[in-house]
């Protein structure tokens, strides 16, 4: 008998249900704190998994109870959310998505895994793979943005990064692809609300990244809190048992979201906790996080014959197998055995700065306002986010809560030793008090430029942080208007930096600021990273992974809508348009300037006729006519001209980066396997349909900037 069979043969029902239970924990000065009688329950073997424990000391203390004091000595699985770094906070996932850099995505996940594992953790509830086309939804900050293909790339890189090549390594964590599936399209962007989308959208937009995560070997999957077309995901038999386990062959652990099994009662699909436990187990959920529905409900359900011991055993076996794969049976203390060397931590901090400075998106830069001229003598640094180090960390602090983070002001002080920096917040982030605006306006006189640091509080995005009006909160618009008016009378430029966990609706600012940057939330090195960009030490390389709406009413908005029979035409009244706002976004998906000035020419696509098993080579020439070296991100899109179901006007199929010195020219070549031009036909089955396909290449999804060439699938 192998180890798992031997253990299973000895387990009592309460011990089995313990392996299917995950309980929250915390750490107080007095020691670990876990809900109710959990410490005793660990010794009794009736709690087998924990979440929310920070620090190798407490983790090992709990592990010792399980391994040394419980009857069977089964180690605990201890997990924690590592959303954008563990102690070292990196830019939020939305910002990282805009890097379009698979190697970097993998590297930050690897570093976060090392850091988490060095504190004894063996699992993280990441990556978050929810496509979002709705900036009202606060969890947009935690995810990949609007594009399914980009999400696939992120899924692969993140799973590789967290898990490494060997799950049992002391530096690897079990990853968790979440939230399965289609959590992003919550009705009207309101957190936890119902989701109602088509089968086509589910398969084209939301499932691909989960398929990619499974193929990359993800160890665990978490169902979303939400319902999908009437069926809560925690009880979704067709998608969990049918698609995930059946079609995709996923045999890892499905862990519920926090209290989600009990919430099946509130959803109105379960009569009580017993019923809820039955529904979740039948759907394939192995671990019950925080509802205590399995421990309380499954013994009753078993007695009533509503579940079988074989069904319970199948889940227990999966949990034990994961613990074995993680090496927890061989050495439960390997993770967190030794503190990380200081050099490794310092190197990680450098990485955080590098990633953060590259993630900044330069949305606008009139008359080369940026980088700041070297002779800048005085800078007015205005706004509630200029001196706000804690906010820089972003919506998920995790174990980084007590770590330092650099404010914009501190970053500038370190970088611009000879420049006079005058600061006033003007207003608070979200208060109605505008009595400080005059003082802020007065700082403009005698300054060479104004830096306006505006945006959201970190906690305005993330979980449970939907906003009906994702615009500048409080009186920040009034501050921006007053300061800009004065600056423009004085003839000095206004550089606005936006902090947010989502695209904001800021048409006025986009029109009136001379330069505009989206800094999202950049993590511990935010201030240094922003100084790097402002001074020109780094050319910004971030591209927005979501379209920025001009008005709230355009939401949901994304770059690839399907065509209408009446496309917008100013000469024809009865066409698809708004009466009060343009159809296009304020900033398109992929938009982001650099300090170079790139032009594109000579798009070549070979061969002009391609079969399903062949690969297209798409190349384009680039020149940097700017005065500075910079790295350009080049996007490749496709559009089928004729197909039996309507296809998105643009579909991302590739990206590449090219760094060019001033005056230099070069080219990039992208390979596109023709099989990637398949689409889901009328019956939702993949179809390779002969016909013309347009290949489009350019700096963003904005139609006017794209070079195009038509090829033929045959
Ligand atoms: C609830 C969130 O939805 C989920 O993403 C997270 O992993 C769990 N809480 C655990 O913290």
Image: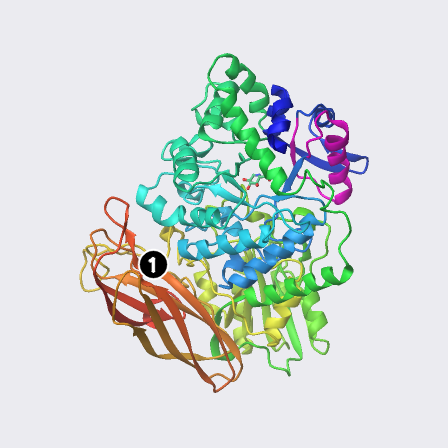
Judge by depth and name the residue closer to the eye, 67 or 581.
Answer: 67
Q: How far from the left and from the top, in percent, is residue 183?
A: 45, 42
Q: Which residues are magenta?
A: 47-75
Please tell me in which quarter of the rendered image ligand 1 is found. Answer: top right
Q: How far from the left and from the top, in percent, is residue 615?
A: 33, 66
Q: How far from the left and from the top, in percent, is residue 33?
A: 74, 33
Quarter-of-image position of residue 424 = bottom right
Q: How far from the left and from the top, in percent, is residue 573?
A: 19, 58
**Secondary structure state at the residue bearing disc 1:** helix
Give the residue pinned by disc 1: 676
Q: Does any portion of residue 439 appear in the rendered image?
A: no
The quadrant the C terminus occupies is bottom left
Q: Is residue 119 left or right of residue 159?
A: right
Judge by depth and name the residue closer to the eye, 210 or 600.
Answer: 210
Q: Residue lying farthest bottom?
A: 663
Residue sitting at x 78%, y 50%: 338
Q: Residue lying farthest top?
A: 304
């Amino acid at each position: 008998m192998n180890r798992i069979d031997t253990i299973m043969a000895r387990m009592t029902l309460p011990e089995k249900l313990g392996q299917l239970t995950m309980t929250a924990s915390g750490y107080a000065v007095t020691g670990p704190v876990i809900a109710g009688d959990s410490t005793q329950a660990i010794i009794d073997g009736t709690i087998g998994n924990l979440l929310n424990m920070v620090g190798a000391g407490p983790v090992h203390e709990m592990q010792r109870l399980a391994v040394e004091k419980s009857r069977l000595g089964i180690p605990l699985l201890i997990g924690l959310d590592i959303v954008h770094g563990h102690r070292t906070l990196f830019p939020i996932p939305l910002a990282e998505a805009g890097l379009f850099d698979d190697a970097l995505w993998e590297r930050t996940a690897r570093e976060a895994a090392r850091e988490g594992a060095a504190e004894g953790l063996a699992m993280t509830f990441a990556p978050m793979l929810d496509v979002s086309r709705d900036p009202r939804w606060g969890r947009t900050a935690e995810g990949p943005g609007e594009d399914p293909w980009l999400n696939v790339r992120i899924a692969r890189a993140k799973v590789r990064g967290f898990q490494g090549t060997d799950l049992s390594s002391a530096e690897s964590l079990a990853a968790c692809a979440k939230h399965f599936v289609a959590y992003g399209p919550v009705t009207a962007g309101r957190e936890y609300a119902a989701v109602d989308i088509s089968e086509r959208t589910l398969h084209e937009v939301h499932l691909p990244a989960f398929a990619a995560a499974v193929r990359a070997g993800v160890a665990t999957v978490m169902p979303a809190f939400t319902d999908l077309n009437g069926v809560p995901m925690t009880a979704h038999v067709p998608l969990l048992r049918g698609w995930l386990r059946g079609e995709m062959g996923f045999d890892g652990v499905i862990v519920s979201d926090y209290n989600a099994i009990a919430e099946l009662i509130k959803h109105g699909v379960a009569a009580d906790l017993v019923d809820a436990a039955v529904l979740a187990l039948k759907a394939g959920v192995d671990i019950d996080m925080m509802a205590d529905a399995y421990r309380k409900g499954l013994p009753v359900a078993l007695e009533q014959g509503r579940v079988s011991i074989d069904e319970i055993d199948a889940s227990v076996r999966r949990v034990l197998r994961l613990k074995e794969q993680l090496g927890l049976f061989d050495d439960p203390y390997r993770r967190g055995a030794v503190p990380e060397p200081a050099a490794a931590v310092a190197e990680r901090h450098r990485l955080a700065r590098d990633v953060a400075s590259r993630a900044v998106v330069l949305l606008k830069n009139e008359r080369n306002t940026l980088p700041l001229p070297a002779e800048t003598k005085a800078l007015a640094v205005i706004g509630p986010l200029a001196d706000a180090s804690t906010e820089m960390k972003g919506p998920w602090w995790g174990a980084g809560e007590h770590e330092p983070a650099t404010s914009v002001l501190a970053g500038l002080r370190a970088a611009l030793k000879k420049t006079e920096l005058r600061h006033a917040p003007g207003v608070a982030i979200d208060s109605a008090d505008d009595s400080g605006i005059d003082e802020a306006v007065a700082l403009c006189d005698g300054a060479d430029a104004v830096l306006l640091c505006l945006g959201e509080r970190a906690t305005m995005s993330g979980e449970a942080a939907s906003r009906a009006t994702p615009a500048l909160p409080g009186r920040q618009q009034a501050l921006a208007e007053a300061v800009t008016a004065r600056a423009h009378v004085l003839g000095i430029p206004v550089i606005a930096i936006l902090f947010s966990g989502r695209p904001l609706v800021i048409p006025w600012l986009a029109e009136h600021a001379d330069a505009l940057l989206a800094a999202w939330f950049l993590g511990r090195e935010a201030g240094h990273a922003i100084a790097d960009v402002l001074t020109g030490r780094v050319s910004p390389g971030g591209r927005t992974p979501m379209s920025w709406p001009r008005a709230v009413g355009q939401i949901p908005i994304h770059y690839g809508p399907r065509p209408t029979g009446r496309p917008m035409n100013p000469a024809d009244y009865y066409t698809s348009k708004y009466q009060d706002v343009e159809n296009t976004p304020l900033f398109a998906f992929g938009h982001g300037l650099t300090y170079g000035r790139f032009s594109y020419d000579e798009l070549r696509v070979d061969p002009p006729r391609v079969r399903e098993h062949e690969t297209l080579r798409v190349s384009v020439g680039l020149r940097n006519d700017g005065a500075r070296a910079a790295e350009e991100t080049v996007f490749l899109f496709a559009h089928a001209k004729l197909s039996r179901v309507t296809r998105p006007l643009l579909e991302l199929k590739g990206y590449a980066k090219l760094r060019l010195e001033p005056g230099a020219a070069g080219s990039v070549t992208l390979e596109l396997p023709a099989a990637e031009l398949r689409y889901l036909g009328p019956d939702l089955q993949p179809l390779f349909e002969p016909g013309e396909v347009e290949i489009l290449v350019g700096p963003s999804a904005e139609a006017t900037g794209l070079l195009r060439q038509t090829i033929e699938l045959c």
